[in-house]
Amino acid sequence: MTVPFLDLAATHREIQAELEAALHQGLEAGQFIGGQGVSVFEREFAAWCGAGHCIGVGNGLDALTLALRGLDIGPGDEVIVPAHTFIASWLAVSQIGAVPVPVEPEMRSFNIDPDQVEQAITPRTRAIMPVHLYGHPADLGPLQVIADAHGLPLIEDAAQAHGALYRGQRIGAHGRVVCWSFYPGKNLGALGDGGAVTTSDTALATRIRMLGNYGSRQKYVHELAGCNSRLDDLQARLLSVKLRHLARWNARRQDIARRYLSGLANSGLSILPVPQDWAEPVWHLFPVFTPDRAALQQFLAAEGIATQIHYPTPPHLQGAYQTMNLPAGSLPLTERLHREELSLPIGPHMSDDQVDQVMDAVRRFFHTS
Ligand SMILES: Cc1ncc(COP(=O)(O)O)c(C=O)c1O
């Protein structure tokens, strides 16, 4: 039996009739930009997160960029970001002319270490951007305390955390503004690009909506130099369908993660994720760590088990950030995670037999079974 990394086709087969009905309604409505499908989804997703407002945008990177612009952050400003993240978190900051200032992770949830944030703050710092990587919430409480002490907003990158709980409350309404991606493989994914921003700050919501719509709230009146980044009506309708299934799909991911965590406890891996007491993660990814990553990945591939690496090269060592002068060795924890990380298959349509097959193969690799 082969084990795909994520079986998206199975997800769509399960709800095919609902998706087709939603597409049919969208075609009938015929308003593909700014249609009712978008406003309905925005209302549903805001309510689901417990946020006052949701603004649909073109993708997750735009969600971050628009949130930063919405807060009037720009050239000459600094934004504190996790060193260990997908590069989009940094690129959003660079795109508006500001400087990403990386902070190392704490090694329990692999998210930004609140204990190291304060020393990264300078007079130019304008925001702190935690990322809920792998679907595990960052420790927002201490981050908010630091943010408040310095008068800074928290801009959350929740691209991997749809439905995750921080101290019992869904991600989406903790920080000043929360940014989402609906890239197809996300826990809540569109059938193409999509993104959103949630916030309970009404003035900020209005400004972000304008910025993504040519700086306009009234046709042909342009108050701001905005851009075009909107969620398509058809994608919004498909997202509304998938949102109805998200809690159940996340619960299945949590079930698989529990099986992995007990079955792989003494398997020879150097680090396993440990859900922290503040968090109920939704396991967008299931990361494991070993210095023998390349060999383990090859061994699993030979067994028909697909894995991925998140991520092979940290942002500070990418060509895009060579001018930042952060050579190899400057962010050692991040670099270790990037050297050793391997994501095992996980998804709502993975069977127990497939999970057992993965665990058995990992144990055989390390000769622990
Ligand atoms: C942590 C993180 N931030 C931002 C993004 C950007 O989202 P998108 O691909 O929708 O632009 C992604 C996903 O791709 C992500 O994983």
Image (spheres, rainbow, N blue to C red):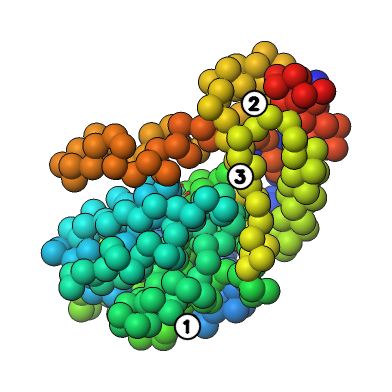
Q: Quadrant location of residue 120? A: bottom left
**Residue under circle 1?**
200
Q: Nearer the viewer, residue 279 or 191?
A: 279
Q: Quadrant location of residue 55? A: bottom left
Q: Is residue 91 above or below residue 126?
A: above
The amino acid marked with disc number 3 is Leu
Quote the CA–CA distance across marks 2 and 1: 40 Å
Asked if disc 3 and disc 2 are in contact, CB closer than 8 Å, the reply is no
* Mark closer to the observer (2, 1): 2
The amino acid marked with disc number 2 is Ala
Residue 289 in the figure: left or right of residue 149: right
Residue 209: numbered disc: none
Mark 1 crowd level (few <14, some 14–19, many ≥20, 10 Å Cα): many
The amino acid marked with disc number 1 is Ser
Q: Name the quadrant of the N terminus.
A: top right
Quote the CA–CA distance across marks 3 and 2: 13 Å
N-terminal of the two: label 1 or label 3? 1
Residue 297 in the figure: left or right of residue 359: left
> Label 3's element?
loop
**Residue under circle 2?**
306
Image position, residue 181 (x, y; %): 49, 55
Asked if disc 2 and disc 1 are in contact, CB closer than 8 Å, the reply is no
Mark 2 crowd level (few <14, some 14–19, many ≥20, 10 Å Cα): some
> Label 1's element?
loop
> Label 2's element?
loop
Does mark 1 have its CB less than 8 Å from ligand 1? no
Residue 285: numbered disc: 3
